[in-house]
Image (spheres, helix red, strand yellow):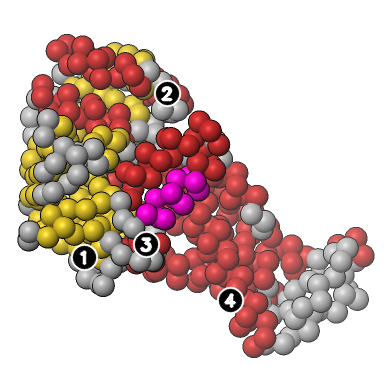
């Protein structure tokens, strides 16, 4: 089985399909590596004789490797099983294809039946071994507790005003939600108009909704909190951390929750620095990341988006350190200060899923300034939630105060960037926001 099915799955735009494609390809790679390094070398069985196989059924080019186990069968089974572990529907679609690949190896005389069975078993085992190392989303604990009462049920979406950021890029999901909730009111606008449209919608809404990325969700959450309204979130951006951590991936996840009034309470992070204040649902950071965003915006108009990322990284990493704070009366250089709204689980170089969006804690991490910034940031990315290393420190707090921040220092929150004006304070509003959440997230 080639990588083409993986590309086709990823191209559907569905987050579940993309995860299934990645897991399928990773399972295939693990199975292939195991077969080629161990399987073929351990049992050197020759290929079947082709005397009894009609010429029309024989392969145009006969394989020259040993027969046991079947690599094609292992790859097909690994890919289909990996996909099925993330998406049973797509797994059911691919199962007949994988079976056909395995059966064809016997039909063409390339393998004995035992080779195919052993290869398929190894492929399935590789997919499950990978799941043991990298759990599927269904294996992780459900976030978004506790469940709250008193959130209105909205049959057909009646009373819901959904403000759609038309620049976010999720028209298919929006159309699906419009079809499923015909009584809801949908307001389409640009990103620049979003805040004003949300404020206008709030007085006439029983529930306020937003379709967009994490920045759009942040804006809508601020309006919902001020007006005491529950929030409906339809992911429409690039990363969609908040929506995905709630288990919301598409319109189907939302409809039952909205119509039945199923919701959860989540924490809201708040920050203030001089006259600048705001909220964050995901993360807040000072140092390398907001500097990187600022440099990227500066260079994107000159050299284009992809190259701007490289140029920005070079400019940021060549500095001694992008941030200094005051700690115990002394200036302390930092590469990064990160505060997460609730505890994050890290896996590799990506920020993992939060398993509790109402734990009342800030997940605070720092990366000290000094030489080898790339190594320091990499070590922090690979570190666990409460690890401590020469480069990286992590702790959990209920509030945070950072003194001595140079005025004008960039501050990033939920993908948006503002600037600090000296001292920065961060605290939590425990269970400060009610969000409609699908039954799978309860």
Numbered badge on residue 167? 2
Q: CA distance from mark 4 to mark 2?
A: 45 Å
Residue occupied by mark 1: 393
| Few, some or many residues within 10 Å of mark 3 (<14, 14–19, 20+) | many
Report the front residue among 415 and 224. 415
Q: Quadrant of residue 379?
A: bottom left
Residue 442 is one of the magenta-drawn residues: no
User: In what element is the residue under mark 2?
Assistant: loop
Residue depth check, mark 2 versus mark 1: number of the one nearer the observer: 1
In x, y percent, where is residue 301?
50, 31
Residue occupied by mark 4: 34
User: In what element is the residue under mark 4?
Assistant: helix
Q: CA distance from mark 2 to mark 1?
A: 38 Å
Residue depth check, mark 3 versus mark 1: number of the one nearer the observer: 3
Relative to 284, residue 161 above or below: above
- Residue positioned 37% across, 62% down in the render: 373
Q: Is residue 414 visible?
A: no
Q: Is residue 339 visible?
A: yes
Residue depth check, mark 4 versus mark 2: number of the one nearer the observer: 2
In x, y percent, where is residue 405?
17, 46
- Residue range highlighted in magenta: 309-319
């Amino acid at each position: 089985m080639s990588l083409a099915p993986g590309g086709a799955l990823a191209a559907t735009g569905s987050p579940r399909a993309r995860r299934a494609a990645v897991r399928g390809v990773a399972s295939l790679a693990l199975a292939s590596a195991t077969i080629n390094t161990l399987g073929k070398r351990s049992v050197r069985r020759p290929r079947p004789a082709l005397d009894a196989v009609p010429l029309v059924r024989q392969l145009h080019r006969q394989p020259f490797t040993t027969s046991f186990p079947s690599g094609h069968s292992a790859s097909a089974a690994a890919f289909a099983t990996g996909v099925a572990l993330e998406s049973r529907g797509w797994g059911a679609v691919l199962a007949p294809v994988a079976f056909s690949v395995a059966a064809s190896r016997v039909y063409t005389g390339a393998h004995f039946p035992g080779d195919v069975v052993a290869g398929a078993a190894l492929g399935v085992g590789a997919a499950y071994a990978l799941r043991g190392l990298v759990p599927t989303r269904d294996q992780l604990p459900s976030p978004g507790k506790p469940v709250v009462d008193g959130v209105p049920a909205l049959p057909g979406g009646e009373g819901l005003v959904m403000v759609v950021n038309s620049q976010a890029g999720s028209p298919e999901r929006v159309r699906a939600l419009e079809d499923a909730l015909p009584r809801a009111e949908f307001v389409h606008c640009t990103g620049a108009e979003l805040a004003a449209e949300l404020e206008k919608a709030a007085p006439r809404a029983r529930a306020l909704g937003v379709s967009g990325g994490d920045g759009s969700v942040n804006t809508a959450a601020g309006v919902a909190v001020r007006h005491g309204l529950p929030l409906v979130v339809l992911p429409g951006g690039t990363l969609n951390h908040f929506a995905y951590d709630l288990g919301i991936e598409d319109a189907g996840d939302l409809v039952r929750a909205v119509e039945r009034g199923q919701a959860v309470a989540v924490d809201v992070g708040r920050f203030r620095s001089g006259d600048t204040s705001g909220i964050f649902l995901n993360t807040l950071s000072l140092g390398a990341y907001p500097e990187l965003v600022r440099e990227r915006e500066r260079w994107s108009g000159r050299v284009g988006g992809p190259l701007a990322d490289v140029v920005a990284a070079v400019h940021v990493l060549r500095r001694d350190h992008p941030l200094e704070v005051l700690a115990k009366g002394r200036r302390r250089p930092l590469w990064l200060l990160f505060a997460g709204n609730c505890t994050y689980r890290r896996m590799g170089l990506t920020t993992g899923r939060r398993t509790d969006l109402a734990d009342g804690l800030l997940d605070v991490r720092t990366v000290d300034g000094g030489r080898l910034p790339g190594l320091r940031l990499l070590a922090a990315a690979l570190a666990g939630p409460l690890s401590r290393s020469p480069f990286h420190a992590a702790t959990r707090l209920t509030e945070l105060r950072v003194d001595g921040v140079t005025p004008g220092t960039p501050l990033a929150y939920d993908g948006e960037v503002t600037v600090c004006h000296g001292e920065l304070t961060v605290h939590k509003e425990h269970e400060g926001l009610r969000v409609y959440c699908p039954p799978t997230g309860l």
